[in-house]
Structure formats: C-alpha cells, structure tokens
Amino acid sequence: MVQMNSTNIKKTLDSDLCTGCGICEGACPTGAISTIVIDGNFRPRVDTDKCVNCGRCVKACPGLGVELVGLANKYQSDTSCYDKMVGRYEKCFTGYSNNNDVRFHSASGGMVSQFLIWLLENNKIDGAIVTKFDINSPLLVKTIIATTREDIISARSSKYAPVTLNRAVQDIKAASGSRYVVVGLPCHIQGMRKLMDIDRGLREKVVGLFGIYCSCGRSFYLTEHVFKERGIPKDKITYFQYRDEGCLGKMVVKIPEGDANTIRVNSNSESVLYNKDVVYKEHYQSYYHPLRSFFVPRRCLFCIDHYAELADVCFGDIHIRPYSDDKVGVNSIIVKNKKWLSLLEDCQKAGEVHIDEVSFKIVSDSQKMSFKKKGRNGAFVNLCKKLRMTVPIYDVDYLRQPTKRDYLDYIQNRFQQYIGCHKSLWWLVTRLKSKINIH
C-alpha cells in the first residue's frame, strides 16, 4: 500500500501536489475541508477546529499517488486485455452520437452525452455527475447531478479549466437514487476510486466511472488570459464553449451587442451579429495550442495516467486518419469491463450511437501525449525524487530515469508555469507563445 505520513490534506498542499479534484472534501466526515480558488486553481482549506485527523482525505488523495495496478487488479479483474499504456481493458471502439445536434456541439463525437442520455432515459442510472458552464459564476464552471436530458446537454463538450468534484460525494450520498455515474478526468477518477475503496456507502451508489482522456490540466488563468488578450468581457457572456461546432471545433462566445465593443478579432477568428448577440468564434488550435505550458499546474507534470485507467469507460478524441477527416466529430472509447461493454452495445442496438470496434493500437497511435506522460512525466517523477522533492507514489515499474533532455524540459516547463502564475508577467506569454495559423 502507498504510505503517507500526514494525517490530513496539508501534506498535499505543502508538497505542491494538489490536483484540485476536491475528493478530499467529500472524504472528510466532519466537514473540515472546503474547496476554494487560490491563484487560479481549486485548493482545499482545512478547518483545524473540525479536523479529527482521521486520515480519510489523505487516503483518498490522488495528488500524493495512486496504485494504478493494485486498484485495477481489484476492480477490473474480469477484463481480457492489458497494455501498460492504458492498463486493463475489454474492447476499444470509435463512435459518435446519431443525434446530429449532440454530435456537432460536443467537440469529439458526443459519445459521453449520448450514452448518458440513453442510460438515464432507459432507467439504467438515476443520475450522473457532470460539469457545465455557469454564466452566473465568475469561474464559469459548475458540477451538478444531471437527472434529465437537458442537464446532460448543458454539460457537453470540453472544459479547459479546473473542475472540482468537491460536493459530488455529499450530493450522491444525499440523493434519493442508488445508481450514479461520475464523469471526470484521470485525477477525479483516481480519487473517486480510492475513496470508494474505503467508503462502502459511496461504492454502493456509484455504479460507473466515466473517464475523459487528459493531456494536462489548465488553471483558470488560461481563460482569463485568453479573454483579456481578445477584449472579451467575462461578466457579459451569455454563452461560452471552449470547443463547439464540430471536430476540434472553435471557441464560441456570445455577448450582447451593446457590451461587445471591446472585442478584438484576429486572423483566426470572426465576430458576427446574431439575434442581438455578438458571436465571437476562434479556432481551438489558434487560441489553445500556442499557450504551451504557461497555465499548466505543476502537479500535471507528474501525471502518468492519460486515459483515466481506473474508469469503467474512457472517452477521448481520435485525431488520426481516416477519423480526423471527419469534420463533425468522432470519439475513441475504451471499455474496461463486460458490464459496461454490454450497456454500450445495447445503446448502439437502440440506434442512439454508432460504434466500430478497433484495436488499442489505433487508439494509442492517436494519443501522442500518452507516450509523453508514461515516459517524460515518469522521468520527471524520478528527477524530482533525486532532488529530494516529495513526488507522487505509483505502484508501477516503468518510470524511467531522467536524461539531460528531461532536466531541460522540466526547467522549461517550470519557467513557463512561473510566468503563467504571475499576471504581471503575462506580457511575456504573448511574446513567447508558439505561432500558429489556421487555414
């Protein structure tokens, strides 16, 4: 077992290993932990008067490490296949929603949204933890229990901002239903799996974990920088998506006509008037890819889990031909056990989705970042261990030793992150970010 010395989540904070997942708040039996935003990221705050040092938050914390092999052996033991890039799995597919609207507005095929809708409407689950944009929030994100088709639709597409499941555990336990799915990134899935391992009540109510592939997280400062650079008034937004309108897609922002006079259009964007709203659109690759690691949290440099290996079903893009030629959107799907394979196949038989079985090699070839996370990020773990820093603990034997290139990469990433964390230095982001033109 992974051994930790501290009895509360302060160890994670002191070591700068917090993922911001919020699982510790749900793990705390006394309500001593609350999740707040600090320097553009979600972070736990401990009320020492309420803390009884039970250690549950530490046991559930994915930031300090996770037994990827041990937990997979325990909860995915009925699977037929294994690859060190993804762990245990049953089958892989490409697929998309047969609802054209869901597919077009979901960035990569709409499989998560359509599958959840089918599960809800066919009484397979009582609800799902999903994250939607909240125009009434200065941070624009909100995690909810979706219990209707409309709830699911409101949470579609990618979120390039921090997401916390801080209230998810309490909400699930308080809900009247008994069958819930949790949708999250690898760190969310790790934390949920670790907490479910020690919390029988939660384990009995969560029937599925849906993982979203993740190359790395981004702080709220990314959104703030993008808006500032383009003159987008955040407090006037009526609609916002990071990726809308087809495969890869565009950032789409709607602002009332009278409040949009500050918007600055560039060569990869457009601004049009529609129903008294100014609609700003910019290609995803244009605003997101050039920002490199400026707004990536340090903890993401140590993550070796690209696919959300401990999930029941994993979803992501598939940007290799012939799938990348499809401009509406195609997902790749990795099913981790026979139960969820059967449900996915039933969803296809019902005509809600289209899926085609593919080899894991096809999925893997489309996910270049997964190799970097297993290789370079694994080397970063050993690099910082050599420097006597506290690092995440994994139960794997393939973390390679760092090379000179890894040392340089780590220094470069930390330099960019330092700039991104300090707003007074953001003028350097504009100077140093990569150049990219979309045609």
Image (spheres, grey):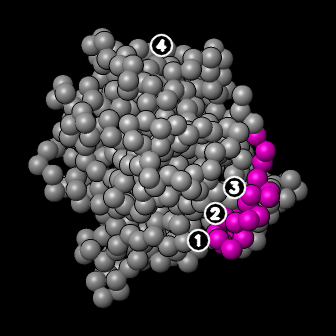
Q: What residue occupies the far right of the structure in this picture?
A: 404
Residue 430 highlighted magenta (yes or no): yes
Question: Seen in the image, is 120 located left or right of residue 220?
Answer: left
Residue 352 highlighted magenta (yes or no): no
Span colored in magenta: 416-436
Q: Secondary structure at mark 3?
A: loop
Mark 1 and mark 4 lie on one chain; the one further toward the N terminus is 1
Mark 3 and mark 1 lie on one chain; the one further toward the N terminus is 1
Gap between marks 1 and 4, in whole Å?
Answer: 42 Å
Identify residue for label 3: 293
Q: Amino acid at mark 3?
A: Ser
Identify residue for label 1: 16
Mark 2 and mark 3 lie on one chain; the one further toward the N terminus is 3
Mark 1 and mark 2 lie on one chain; the one further toward the N terminus is 1
What residue is at 76 percent from the left and 40 percent from the top? Answer: 436
Gap between marks 4 and 2, in whole Å?
Answer: 37 Å
